[in-house]
Image (spheres, helix red, strand yellow):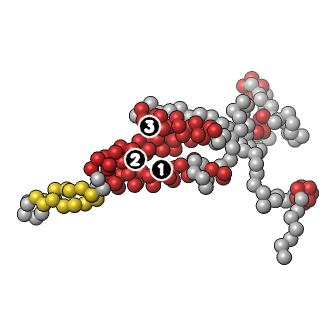
Amino acid sequence: MPAARKSDALHEVGGTTPHDRTPTDSHLVSGRPRCPKHLSPAARKTFKLFCRQLEARRALTEGDGFLLQLAAELWDRRARAQAKLLEEGEIKLYTRLDANSVAHQIEKTNMSLKVATDAERQLVAILDRLGLSPIAGPKIRKTVANNEPTYAPGTIGYDLLHADDAPGPQLVALSPEQMDGVDGDE
């Protein structure tokens, strides 16, 4: 029979952390990445669509820019390959030369089919990583508003931001003139 679940107060008294609960606070700061200039108009439209979807889920950060760029380019590549595939069909006749340099017509799967399926496979992985799939969506942590900088506890940024609240030694900013009087070799 499993042990009863400890309350948060008991965890605090014992100095332990509950393993069955995930932290709800996020240290990811929201932001919108810039749309790369080299993207085609269709890929640019897709990039902005993905950004809007991630913003609606409160999961868009500036660090997502590269993955969004790749996803937009793959989406565009897949669309071009799909259009060519619909035009030519899945099976296509290719001309091949044999050892005697005689041309033969050979039926093979269309090369655009491989391009389209590879792009789809990569696109699914990227969209899953971004949290734009039904399974990964709930697992993505929400971002915090970009109004003021927030830092994870224990980082230098957190210590500098909360230096006045800390009961221990205080961080002091010294000018170069003040540094001349300080001897650090003791």
Give the residue number, with chain letter if any, for mark 1.
Answer: 123
Disc 3 residue type (three-letter): Ala
Disc 2 residue type (three-letter): Arg
* Cβ–Cβ under 8 Å for marks 2 and 3: no
First reached walking from the N terminus: tag 2 or tag 1:
2
* Cβ–Cβ under 8 Å for marks 3 and 1: no
Q: Name the quarter where the N terminus is drawn.
A: bottom right
Figure check: 160 above or below 116: above
Q: Nearer the viewer, residue 96 or 165?
A: 96
Q: Nearer the viewer, residue 107 or 177?
A: 107
Q: Is residue 82 left or right of residue 145?
A: left
Q: Which numbered marker is on residue 43?
A: 3
Q: Is residue 65 visible?
A: no
Give the residue number, with chain letter if any, for mark 2.
Answer: 78
* Cβ–Cβ under 8 Å for marks 2 and 1: yes
Residue at 85%, 33% in the rendered image: 164
Q: Which numbered marker is on residue 156?
A: none
Residue at 34%, 54% in the rendered image: 113
Figure check: 116 above or below 72: below
How far across and how far down the image is residue 91, in percent? 27, 58
Disc 1 residue type (three-letter): Leu
Q: Secondary structure at mark 3?
A: helix
